[in-house]
Amino acid sequence: MKLNQLSVYFIFLSLTLIFSCSKEDTKIYGGKYYESYTFEKPVINGQTFYIDPVNGSPNGDGSIKHPWRTLQEVIDSHLVQCYKPSESYNAESDPELINQSAPIEGGDRIILLSGYHGFLNLNYFMFTDWLTIEGAEGADPVFSQIKFTGAFKNIYLKNLTIDKSSYERSKNFWEAEDINQNSKACLYLGSSDFWGNCSNIKVDNLKLRTTTEVSGWTTADWVEKASDGIALRSAKNIEVVNCKVENVRHGITVDYNSEHSKVVNNSVIDFCGDGSRVNSNHVLFAYNTIIGCLKVDDNHDDGIQSFSRGDDGTAGTGVVSGVTIRGNIIIGVKDFNNPMYGSLQGIGCFDGMFDNWIVENNLIVSNTYHGISFYGMLNSKILNNTVIDQVTGDDVSPWILIHEHKNGTESNNCTIANNIVSSSVSYSGENVEAGNNFVFGKSNYDSVLFMFVDPQNNDFHLLDNAYTRNNIIDKGMVFKSLVSSQADLEQELRADSPDLGAYEYVE
């Protein structure tokens, strides 16, 4: 049985509608039933300026009647007042005011109209009040890259498109040093020992892609040309919400030292590496949709991957702690007619240790062994996930696994509960336990027809019948402090005894 590709898009569209917010200034992800994550739109307490690549001029004044031409020109012309650390190699040094007489400053809003705005490759852009850079309503302002490496603070990016192929100085955009040096990502946010630290940036409703047209690409094209979507490295307190990433290598990467960042309600569609990487402490990765793995090289592709790093940067020699993976939808294959389709591992965490993780309410549909796998897990819980095989008739089917670290260090104090799993639930370690999971077995795949509304079309809402009443509905353990015991992937309230899996049965 192969799952229908049209339904893959339906799942993404449905989830987007569910988690879109009706309030203009504040977006709430979660619900009134438990502690929520709230996205707050920064306050605009200054002026509004306009930039129009079609009708603007470098000699404009930024008014709606006389707009400037491109954002790159505005910044290069020193029209933005900002701060940077006064001393190199000292991020905590007193801030130095740059472009003191410039018309734009923190608290202002820059509205961008449709057209190509260039590329931004900056090393400092700090503000005491938030600077808002947003696309005008209905407009499509395009950049070929936005790369912030160094001292950045209080910047809000909204309603923008970053398309690497829009670069105008060379047809071979993938070879252009301007937009590929140090990072090929469409959006890169990172700190620098020399320039300073990057923090407090909000990214809302961006479209990011290598290019729109990849139908003629070969595997070699994907390897050579595909850019990453969003990459964070040593960038703290970053919020990435409502973004669409497509036609990339890695989708969204939260790399080391990017603590207290939040990645919520985004989509990654068609990628040839990992859908996402979460390699930093205290990250919320929630309600994202990851669909369409393409196999073009020897990378072991994952929907969500994590690995620790020690002081010397070696994988598997550190600890990644305080991460929540909640309410995500991961579907390996979008189109079985694409000869490059690949089978991604769902949540693959192979180089621990992983401490104080919550993995709950996720739907994973994949034809691999590793549905959810942790090698070296501490003080963590894997709860109410639905892990389903995407292709039947072979020996490969996804499991949930807690294993010892590759160096032999045991996992400790972990729980696997309330999950629905195709293959198996396996675990080892001290004080590691499993309970109230339903494993129907890879040889009994047809039982999905008794459990779910329309599994062939990726609808894994529960049916109400004798089979589900005996095995799934009201069969869960209660974990009072956790979201998955109070509400499901779609914010439906759980019963006193929660159903197993990511979805609660609702009449």
Image (cartoon, rainbow, N blue to C red):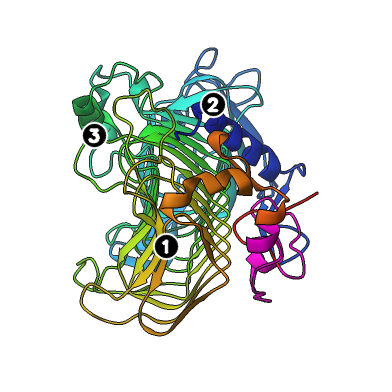
Q: Amino acid at mark 3?
A: Val
Disc 1 crowd, CA 10 A, few/some/many (<14, 14-19, 20+): many
Disc 3 secondary structure class: loop
Q: Amino acid at mark 2?
A: Leu
503 inside magenta stretch: no
Residue 230 visible in the current orientation: yes
The disc placed on residue 432 is none
The residue that label 1 is drawn on is 424
Measuring from the top left, give residue 160's x and y in whole percent.
53, 32
Measuring from the top left, give residue 345's x and y in whole percent.
36, 50
The disc placed on residue 296 is 3
The residue that label 2 is drawn on is 6
What is the span of residues highlighted in magenta in the rendered image?
Answer: 468-497
491 inside magenta stretch: yes
Disc 2 secondary structure class: helix
From the viewer's side, name the closer residue of 27 and 373: 373
Work out whether mark 1 precedes mark 2 in sequence or the reverse, and give the earlier one: 2
From the viewer's side, name the closer residue of 218 and 7: 7
In the picture shown, does residue 329 fall above or below 74?
A: below
